[in-house]
Amino acid sequence: MPDTNPLLQHWTLPPWPAIRAEHLLPAINSIIDDHRRIIAQVLATQLEHPGWDDLVLSIDEADARLSEFRSILETLSMVGPDDADWLVEIAKAHLALNQYRSERARNRPLYEAYQRLTQSSIAASFDESRKIVLARILRKFRQSGIDLPTAQQQELARLNLEIGGLESVFLTHLERWTETWSKRVDDIAQLAGLSPSMKDHLARAAHEAGHEGWLIRLDQNTCQHILKYAENRALREECCVAYATRASDQGPLAGRFDNGPVLTKLLALRQQKAHLLGHENAAQLSLAKNMAGTTAWVRIFSSARLRN
């Protein structure tokens, strides 16, 4: 009997209307099983004499499917139904995905296959772009703690799971705040300067909420449009303050969905992770995968830009 889960079918764009909460966990479990199978097949032929197509491209294609599913989960976390069943299933799928990503990042045979390819005579003739790709792959493995002792690897896995969970909570708080805050407008004169399409958007929002007039909800696009085009200074100020204090202990919904404690815990966990991986702080860990090698370089670059 064929699997009818829409997330396991071939599609060009995600099948949003067909996705149900009960589809999420079975889909990610199936994708993870496929990913494990692909890695096992690759390693069976690529351990001794790995090649670009059979190792790098094959794993990259498998990774892309995981990334697609992660994007779907992140979108559903932000704009999905405000329903307990959905929230529970999204959280379960996030947890399964994060646990597997941690497992994959510690796959030593795969890491060693990439190392062999990098050190091979074949790689010596690679163009610069392929060499950069390989360097980034190996750096990502090292940043995952693959060279750490077992106990520290386990500690890093725990930190990553906690960090991932808190990042999800942070985004959920932002979305819930955005869903809760709104401003009713009864006089169209207060919307002077806004485009006709934005006024229509606000009118539809009011109609859907059962109101007359116009209803402002502070998604990023609406807020930016109001700040840029609204002639009403008081409206711009109200929206600016509300948007800048979303999900915090300040502003019009002070204390509701407060991300302050979440951020405090996240900063502490990211600092622990950075120290575990041999970096002075979380900023340096983040910069390790970018062109700027240290936080000092960033400050110098920023100062130069300000002077210019």
Image (cartoon, grey):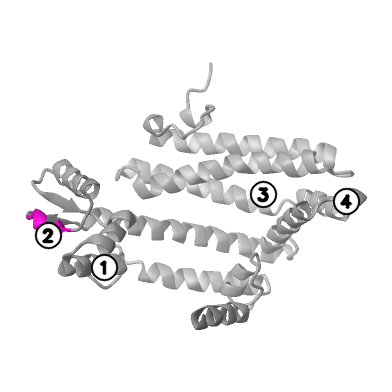
Question: Which sits earlier in the primary sequence, circle 4 or circle 1?
Answer: 4
Question: Which sits earlier in the primary sequence, circle 4 or circle 3?
Answer: 3
Q: Which residue is mark 3?
A: 104
Q: Quadrant of residue 53?
A: top right
Horizontal and vertical percent position of residue 93: 48, 44
Horizontal and vertical percent position of residue 59: 70, 42
Q: Which residue is mark 4?
A: 125
Q: CA distance from mark 2 to mark 1?
A: 16 Å
Please tell me which residue is depicted at 67% across the width and 63% down the height of the picture: 143
Horizontal and vertical percent position of residue 239: 23, 64
Q: Are marks 4 and 1 in contact (CB under 8 Å)?
A: no
Observer-side mark, 2 or 1, equals 2
How would you rate the neighbour count of disc 4 (Cα within 10 Å): few for under 14, some for 14-19, many for 20 or more? Answer: few
Examine the rendering and report whether any part of residue 26 can be seen: yes
Examine the rendering and report whether any part of residue 255 can be seen: no
Q: CA distance from mark 3 to mark 2?
A: 54 Å
The residue segment tinted magenta is: 187-192
Magenta segment, prevailing SS (helix, strand or loop): helix
Q: Which residue is mark 2?
A: 190
Decide which of 225, 173 is in the foreground and name it. 225
Relative vertical location of residue 124 with respect to residue 283 in this rendering, above or below: above
Q: CA distance from mark 4 to mark 3?
A: 28 Å
Q: CA distance from mark 4 to mark 2?
A: 65 Å
Label 3 is placed on what type of residue?
Answer: Arg
Question: Which sits earlier in the primary sequence, circle 3 or circle 1?
Answer: 3
Label 1 is placed on what type of residue?
Answer: Cys
Please tell me which residue is depicted at 76% across the width and 48% down the height of the picture: 110
Please tell me which residue is depicted at 81% across the width and 49% down the height of the picture: 113
